[in-house]
Amino acid sequence: MLESPAEEWAVDEAEKAGWFVRKLRWVGRRNGPDRFFAKDGRVVLIEFKRVGKGARSGQARELDRLRAAGVEVYVVDNPLTALRILEVPYA
């Protein structure tokens, strides 16, 4: 499955469940996560990848920096994993 359709499906399902979602652009930085999700005071950043792919080395370093700052951040290669993280029920 390509990254974009899987990401869009997960975003649509999250929005239906009440999540506020934005696509992120990291001006002046590289390797930041793709999406910002917020609901009920919880903020989650998710990097979406193709099935079987993980974060590139630069992405892994940037995500580790975010985690060290206390940010809830994930890399997912399956849209269902994103929904589980966000606790979104799906059919």
Image (cartoon, rainbow, N blue to C red):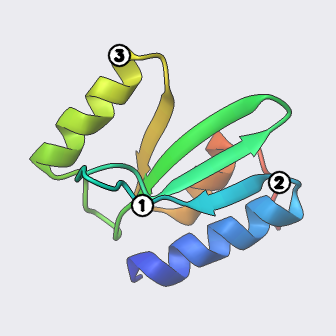
Which of the two marks, 3 or 2, is nearer to us in this view?
Answer: 3
Residue 50 is situated, as x and y percent measured from the top left of the image, at 34, 70
Residue tagged 2:
89
Left or right relative to 37: residue 46: left
Residue 66 is situated, as x and y percent measured from the top left of the image, at 37, 28
Which of the two marks, 2 or 1, is nearer to us in this view?
Answer: 1
| Mark 3 or 2, nearer chain start | 3
Left or right relative to 32: residue 79: right
| Mark 1 or 3, nearer chain start | 1
Q: Please, is residue 22 above or below residue 75 in the view?
A: below
Disc 2 marks a residue whose amino acid type is Pro
Q: Please, is residue 29 above or below residue 70 in the view?
A: below
10 Å crowding of disc 3: few (<14), some (14-19), many (20+) = few
Labelled disc at residue 8? none
- Secondary structure of the residue carrying tag 3 is helix
Residue at position x 54%, y 71% in the image: 7
10 Å crowding of disc 2: few (<14), some (14-19), many (20+) = few
